[in-house]
């Protein structure tokens, strides 16, 4: 497991400026990268972009960081800007594509869905590891990280989905 997470921690350390840039140079060309390396790199990009948006205002129906984002607008923006994947507009529609993942098998970059306001899969976020996710919560908040195992969202978790090949 540590071997799988090492590239993520390297990327996060680089983003924080605690490692020199040459430490993160890839050892293989994209053609030579294994499936695991490609998955890990794409997931890292998704997580880092999501974390860059922490603090952006929530806006119902919002699609861009300048005017604000709702939960699905946040996820769509992150996936489009990082890996070029255009996901459906609503969290409900997003939950109908991709591969279902049990909570015990979530990997960083997977999407997590919640039943809010008694509506199945009415909220979505991006799993970032260590039982945490990043999301645009509601009209009283900003994009932020939360625990998947404690608090309000823990009781409303429904499923995870992976969109990586």
Image (cartoon, rainbow, N blue to C red):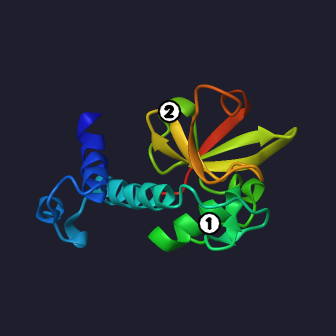
Q: What residue is disc 1 on?
A: 76
Quarter that holds the N terminus: top left
Q: Is residue 108 left or right of residue 61?
A: left
The image quadrant of residue 133 is top right
Q: What residue is disc 2 on?
A: 131
Q: Is residue 94 left or right of residue 24?
A: right
Label 1 with label 2: CB-CB less than 8 Å: no
Question: Which sits earlier in the primary sequence, circle 1 or circle 2?
Answer: 1
Residue 97, position as x, y percentages in the image:
66, 57
Residue 35, position as x, y percentages in the image:
32, 57
Number of other residues with Cα within 10 Å of mark 2, as a class: few under 14, some 14 to 19, many 20 or more: some
Numbered disc 2: secondary structure: loop
Residue 11, position as x, y percentages in the image:
28, 55
Q: Residue 160 has which mark?
A: none
Q: Is residue 84 visible?
A: no
Residue 140, position as x, y percentages in the image:
75, 49
Taking the spot 34% from the left edge, 53% from the top edge, the residue there is: 40
The image quadrant of residue 163 is bottom right
3D distance between C-alphas at marks 1 and 2:
22 Å
Q: Foreground residue, 97 or 60?
A: 60
Taking the spot 49% from the left edge, 34% from the top edge, the residue there is: 105
99 w.r.t. 94: above or below: above
Q: Is residue 16 left or right of residue 84?
A: left
Count the marks. Answer: 2
Taking the spot 70% from the left edge, 36% from the top edge, the residue there is: 158
Q: Is residue 147 visible?
A: yes
Number of other residues with Cα within 10 Å of mark 1, as a class: few under 14, some 14 to 19, many 20 or more: many
103 w.r.t. 161: above or below: above
Numbered disc 1: secondary structure: helix
Q: Foreground residue, 138 or 89?
A: 138
């Amino acid at each position: 497991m540590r071997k799988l997470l090492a590239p993520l921690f390297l990327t996060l350390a680089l983003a924080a400026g605690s490692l020199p840039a040459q430490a993160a140079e890839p050892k293989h060309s994209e053609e030579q990268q294994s499936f695991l390396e490609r998955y890990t790199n794409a997931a890292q990009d998704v997580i880092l972009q999501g974390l860059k948006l922490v603090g952006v205002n929530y806006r119902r129906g919002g699609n861009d960081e300048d005017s604000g984002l709702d939960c699905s607008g946040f996820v769509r923006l992150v996936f489009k800007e990082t890996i070029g994947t255009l996901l459906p507009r609503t969290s409900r529609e997003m939950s109908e594509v991709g591969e279902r993942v049990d909570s015990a098998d979530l990997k960083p970059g997977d999407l997590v869905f919640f039943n809010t306001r008694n509506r199945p899969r009415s909220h979505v976020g991006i799993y970032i590891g260590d039982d945490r996710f990043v999301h645009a919560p509601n009209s009283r908040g900003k994009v932020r990280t939360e625990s998947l195992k404690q608090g309000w969202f823990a009781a409303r978790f429904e499923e995870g989905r992976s969109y990586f090949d």
